[in-house]
Amino acid sequence: MDYNKLAELLFPNVTDTCEDVERRYPPRDLPEGAKVTRFAPSPTGFIHLGGIYGSMIDERLAHLSDGVFYLRIEDTDAKREVPGAAVELIKTLAEYGMEFDEGAAIGEDGEICDKGNYGPYRQSERAHIYHVYAKKLVSEGKAYPVFTTKEELDQLNATDKKAEVKSKVWTEESASAQREEMLKQREFTLEEVEAHVAAGDPFVLRILSEGDGEKKTKVGDLVRGALELPENDEDFVLLKSDGIPTYHFAHAIDDHLMGTTHVIRGEEWLPSLPKHLQLFKYLGFKMPKYLHTAQIMKLDENGNKKKLSKRDMGLDMKDYKRGGYLPECVCEYIMTILNSNYDEWRMQNPEKSYKEFPFSFKKMSNSGALLDFAKLTDVSKNIISRLTAEEVYDKLLPWAEQYDPGFASVLAADKAKAIRILSIGRGGKKPRKDLATWADAKPYMALFYDEFFSVCDEYPENFDKECISGALKKFLETYDFSDDMNLWFEKVKKIADEMGFASDMKAYKASPESYKGNVADISSFIRVAVTGKRSSPDMYEVMQILGNDTVVSRINDAIAKLS
């Protein structure tokens, strides 16, 4: 077989050589030890938690080593591509702090453009590059065509819309029959190829595998250590009939030309690793280092771990945005499951950004990472509690404008009041931790706005309505909005003494049977009447924000309801 002639028949318009391409993608000039990583999503839907999980590893490895982190869009599956998905995923990644040094970006016109010298960064724009290397493999007898007539191709597409364009060999059930058919398809003549080309018949290009599935090949993984995997003995597809490459082929060429040193991807790609080993060998490329991450898991109804699926809340990043989770909180939570020593570091460095943490892949687990919303809530509360009231307002308002316009209009109408509310208990060594998500803000702040205030009569138990009403009436008799906090509380204590409640907690604890209750019970009566809640921020501060008229009105309403 004259392989050079075969290559010319299949790729007559390819005039560049591999050397020509290599010159356009020179080796990167980086410090020793610098890592080049990439995040390479497909624009076939939403960005999910696993995408943020993986991209954070990419970003940390690159930037902690003074390397390069770039974004490549793997849009070779046109049938499954969702219009606008590429733009949305870039925006989502930006929201989660993924700072790309180069790659696909959004231009001033809102369209995707290239930022950097190693593009194009969309695989759909790199077909000519893949064809150069495909022609090389054919000329070396390492790849061959399998022709499919247009009629056969139409029939295949009609029955399986998701199928890649493959030869009929893969429709057989028996592995031995598949192998036999594959070997048959390796047998063809140049004359047969010429006839197919003349007829305009499409073809897929397959690698000519030299592997033995009974033998093992060794490869290292930065998380899983030394692995032994079966050699690849499958003549897998390199180019589909439309000339677009499969993931395997494009991955090898792009990671080589773009200088990728470390490939981070999910463990579901481990079975494909032998294919990639063979491809890098055939192409004469240096292998990148691989890091296959554990799948993200969740507990099912029986307490057993299961893979997080598209049907589960918490996979789609839109779930987090809609739920009001601050992106920084999600990223910090992910860091806690990436490195086991992160929590200890955070305790020692409460004010630092998670990006200052010395992340290491050596601290990663190769078992499934468990999605724990309780832990995420704790992380979120800690982060939001460290923000200033102004920062909270500036982040809360845009979220509310999108997901709760009514609440947003109230916040925007009086910014000073909203910030004053959010300032309660903020700052200091032990700040309040009322908010875990922006969705918590409305229930927390509702008591300050008549539009959202709900009357509540869940007063402390063991006290009759007459007693509660009496305490509220006494409070109104002496209430003065201009009182400072100390005088305000002294008046509450006086009410306690007058009604047989202990104003001194030590005395009450020493002899509780001597009193009807204590001053905390009196405060609870007032709290429920004014706020509609059994618990709330500091009552004096609450009343100062509500104003005299609102406080008096709410207490009078409560008295009337108790009558």
Image: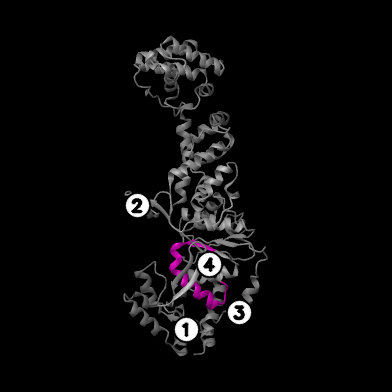
Instruction: Identify the secondary structure beneath mark 4.
Output: helix
Read off the residue under disc 1: 197
Does dot 2 land on a helix, a strand or a loop?
loop
How packed mark 1 is, by other alpha carbons closer than 10 Å (few <14, some 14-19, many 20 or more), is some
Q: Inspect the image, locate mark 4, and give the three-letter code of the amino acid beneath it.
A: Ser
Q: How many marks?
A: 4
Q: Is residue 559 magenta?
A: no
Pointer 2 local density, CA inside 10 Å: few below 14, some 14–19, many at least 20: few
Q: Earlier in the sequence, mark 3 or mark 1?
A: 3
Q: Amino acid at mark 1?
A: Val
Magenta stretch in the rendered image:
263-286
Number of other residues with Cα within 10 Å of mark 3, as a class: few under 14, some 14 to 19, many 20 or more: some
Q: Between residues 542 and 221, which one lies in front from this camera angle?
A: 221
**Distance of label 3 from label 1 (alpha carbons):** 22 Å
**Quadrant, the C terminus:** top left
Asked if the residue under mark 4 is in contact with the one under mark 2, i.e. CB atoms within 8 Å, the reply is no
| CA separation in Å, label 4 and label 3 | 20 Å
